[in-house]
Amino acid sequence: MTRKPISGLRSVEWLDGDDEVAMSHRVAMRLSEEDRGKPIIGIADTRSDFNPCHIGFSSLIDLLESGIRDAGGVPARFPVMSLGEDLMKPSAMLYRNLVSIELEETVRSYPIDGVVYLANCDKTVPAALMAAASTNLPSLVLLGGSRAAPDYNGAPLGTGTALWRALDDYRAGRIDSREWSELETVLRCAGPGACNTMGTASSMAVITEVLKMAVPGSACLPVGSAASRDAAYESGIAVIGALRDADLPAQRMSQAALDDAVVVLAAIGGSTNAVIHLAAIAGRLGLDGSLDRMDRLWRQVPLLVDVEPCGAGLIHDFVAAGGVRALLDALGELTSRGGETLNNDVSWDSAGVIRSLSNPVASAPVLAVVKGNLAPTGAVIKVAAASNELLHHKGRAVVFDDYRDMRSQLDDPSRQYSASDVLIMRNCGPRGAPGMPEWGMIPIPQQLLSRGVADMVRVTDSRMSGTSFGTVVLHVSPEADVGGLLALVRDGDEIELDLDARELRLLCDPAELHKRRMAYSTRPADHLRGWPKLYREHVLQAPDGCDLDFLVAPTSEHRRFVPPVVGRS
């Protein structure tokens, strides 16, 4: 079939013409005469042996290239830093912005007309979406899918969530070292892919499809499935279609689409980390991704998806029930697509894994923003993963100055805890760690675990894994490291959480707080060079997405993607 050439290709600047510059560029690209004039589609290859979430792309990348070629394009792979959530320390979040820069600058500096980003692990997906927003070239994300769910104690194993639950059992003496070792073996048997619970990776995959940045039906597919292979091929076809139609990320990721993603995040019981990522994407596009806007949207959204950690099923059950398309149907008028018949080809059971608005897993709110003097610019709590009796709570503060302090002091037998205590961990935010690691689900002290205490109010300027659970107030802003009130809390202070009032308060005499403020000094930075130093100097707070201040784009001029001057190198 003869296709009409696509006009306005960026790659023409590099590859068209008979001078020595164009010739050398075509030779470098190894372009045949048949390929001349075809669009160049970059494939951002994030595979790494350090990142098990991305190993499955090895069986998809050839199919993606076939789709690109069959649609009339030329695929061109390029390597990208891989953000492996398990092994990167102190946190893959420290490098999310760096990868978004790497992607933006690679696309800017090479003859690339469109992009398919290979992304699956927690921070690689938002990095890809942020880069797509900034470059605004026809782009799609190819999602890598979820890992298997081997049997563990007679039930399918939910990765992440099962580990946290078993950790409490192990520390409390309810399981022994043999059983703990068996869990490790079963976890290894789950194989490659993202977590099969509604953690950050699954949440961001769902959001990516809602934002129309992945082909329909491709979120959270099982690794190695026929559906995932079909999605890879279709992604190659679709990115050429987006190029022909001038269908750009800024058009797809509109304010309405972003609001839909916020609504869906609550309906799935998704990761609180996605709140930060959505704010960062909004900042790149000049949209409103504020916590106030999110909280207004969340107030009417119940939990509709029965998947761990807020529910009972796994992500494979969600996919089998119709996935994103069925969920959008179930949400009806709560999204901008209300009233559409999205899924004539998808049926779903309103009493199953995806519920109806009249039969939710849990009532609204699923997620909430709290403010107050301890978090004047906001903090986030996953209400659906918390204990109802702790959502209106007053207790004595037990303070840990950082993660190391918490790990060394938590189970010190000389410390005495009460179940009503509020555990505080600070200096773990965007600047403080740096990189805001997932340390927020502070373990229950062993002396309380042994007495059957399963949950406590915990307050922190860090994040927690999307597979975690408990009454944890996260992302407290401003963080302690920049002088937020969290830095001034002392053991024995009274802390009050009031979900209905959306407030988190330190109950302390103002004169005493002033005295503490006068004596306070910021902790010295550990990093004097390299990326961590640059990150600390420019990172924004959690409500602004923890992006770097020079990457946000509040005006159209900031969003202008300046091409390079193409000549001799």
Image (tube, rainbow, N blue to C red):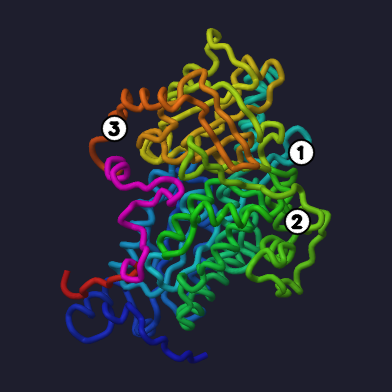
Q: Is residue 378 magenta?
A: no
Establish if 489 lies above or below 251: above
Element at badge 2? loop
Amino acid on which disc 2 is placed: Ile
Q: Of the residues tagged 3 and 2, which is closer to the observer? A: 3
Element at badge 3? loop
Give the distance between the C-alpha atoms of the residues marked 3 and 1, in whole angstroms: 46 Å
- N-term mark: 2 or 1: 1
Is residue 363 at all visible to an observer of this figure? yes
Q: Mark 1 sits on what residue?
A: 155
Q: Quadrant of residue 513?
A: top left
Amino acid on which disc 3 is placed: Ala
Find residue 203 and name its label: none
Is residue 224 at all visible to an observer of this figure? no
Q: Quadrant of residue 510?
A: top left
Q: Residue at x 37, y 24 (%)?
A: 516
Q: Of the residues tagged 3 and 1, which is closer to the observer? A: 3
Magenta residues span 532-558
Q: Mark 2 sits on what residue?
A: 354
Q: Where is residue 136 in the image (x, y as percent from the top left)?
A: 40, 70
Find residue 525 and name its label: 3
Element at badge 1? strand
